[in-house]
Amino acid sequence: MMLLRRAGRGACAGRAQRRIQGKQSGHAGKMNKRILGVNILLFAYFLVLNFFQPLVSDDLCRGAAAALWNHTIWEHLVSDYMNWTGRMTAQLLAYVFLNAPLEGYLIPLFNVVNSFALAVFIFKTFRISTINSPKLSASPRFYVFYAAVMLLALYATRFLASALWKTGGLQYLWGLSILVSVAYSLLRARSESNGKAVLFFAVGLFIGNYNEIYFSSILIVAFAYALYATLSGTARNALSKSVYSFLFGDLIGGCVLIAAPGNYVRLGTVAHGGVSFWEKTVMLGRNLSHNQYLIYLFVVFVLFCVLSLRCCGGERKKTQLAAAIGAATLVLLYVQLLPIAHYDFDNRMFMFWTTVAIALIVSTCVQTGRIEAFFTRYGNAVLCVSIGLIVPFVLSTVHNYHDESVYSAKNMEIINAARERGAGTVILPRRGERDAMFRHGYFGGLSQDKNFWANKCAASYFGVGAIAIADDDRR
């Protein structure tokens, strides 16, 4: 009888526990739907901006080549490898999506895929940053706050401008979105298989050959992660077969990229004969002074590192170790750009750095455990503030990109009219002064000089003799 009573109590307890788990599961499902709703809004916002973003500079050069239309993709890839760059996978994407004869089909497709890539990028970095806090990871309120801060940070650093630019999206954003998705999958992997290992090897091969900055940065981040896993005693769980497969693929792809003769031709061409080590060092420091946002991000990260020193509990040493290794990683990721400091840095070169910095800042803050308690108490207030900040920002950026879209449409009317009457040189009006917000877009690229490389590409793309900007104005 005693055993039956205990069994009965156990059965009742089991049923009660299953009911509680069912309610929690239903609640989690609702939260996931809300997060999905936020992702849909992000996708719609990015889709509007992508459709307003005109083709500029490199877009027109590759579009004029029409490699897909002319069935010359392989010839272009070989020529680039020997004479310009070893980024075979990145160049392949550009030659597929940028084709003047197929613009009406491929550009809308690109806009959809690029919008999806941006939304995935924000969502996956959020998941990576909150991977140690299931409660925050499933919180729609915290995700709205994170997305709002992320949008402002990406805009201020011109990350968003580079990602919306067609060539920038193809040759920087898409690889980065794939990379953060892979990183999240590797961090939360629960099972191993030969099929997964082969898949991650293939992705590593693609990313390694995609961009030399990504190739070297992945190795630095992987070394830092392995160092943390070893010192914290979690190496056995952290370094899986899939991780090794991905890194091996990245190494092979990167070696193929670095071996390209075109890389060194390009360095000599852009640097006008070469730049000394000292000149590169000066350029690196000068770029830091020109891009104050890098300093801001690093200062904020240092502040969170200080905050981590006050972290209580058994995870304190791990948090401090992660903060120290993270700070050193940010420094190495910046210094490793020195070999390619052959001209003034463009903001797209810091897209990987910005991603790592933001992830480290948020994850360090989450690791302290304080932000979870803060959102439990003040989550609704933070949600209202986040919405209040992001709505004016969204409206402003949409207005500014629409303004540029209208300007580009008027230019097309001028170009079409000039082509019909057989004009030799098309003179486009200069763009009026932009406000501070508008300068963060990636527009223009044309010069008053019709022989400037971007002008030649534009003339070839639109099928006219020459194109120039009126007055002394490079848009």
Image (cartoon, rainbow, N blue to C red):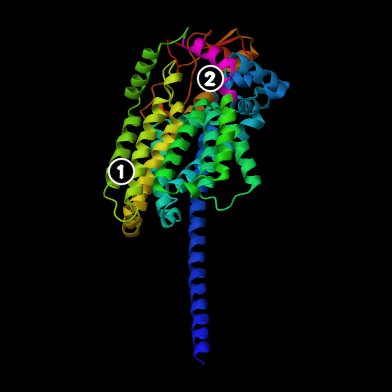
Image coords of residue 193 (percent x, y): 63, 49
Q: Amino acid at mark 1?
A: Phe
Image coords of residue 64 (percent x, y): 63, 18
Which segment did they paint magenta?
Answer: 256-271
Instruction: Identify the secondary structure beneath mark 1.
Output: helix
Which residue is label 1 attached to?
304
Q: Residues within 10 Å of mark 2 (few under 14, many from 20)?
A: many
Labels 1 and 2: the sequence-earlier one: 2
Along the line of sight, the residue nearer the viewer: 333 or 349? 333
Q: Quadrant of the C terminus?
A: top left
Q: Is residue 314 above or below residue 174?
A: below
Q: Residue furthest bottom?
A: 1
**Is residue 305 one of those drawn in magenta?**
no
Q: Amino acid at mark 2?
A: Ser
Query: Are the residues flagged by discs 1 and 2 in contact, CB closer than 8 Å?
Result: no
Image coords of residue 192 (percent x, y): 60, 50
Residue at coordinates 51% horizontally, 52% vertically from top-left? 37
Q: Main secondary structure of the magenta part?
A: helix
In this picture, residue 440 sits left or right of residue 248: left
Count of marks placed on residues: 2
Image coords of residue 424 (percent x, y): 60, 7
**Is residue 257 one of those drawn in magenta?**
yes
Q: Is residue 240 above or below residue 267?
A: below
Q: Residues within 10 Å of mark 1 (few under 14, many from 20)?
A: many
Along the line of sight, the residue nearer the viewer: 35 or 350? 350
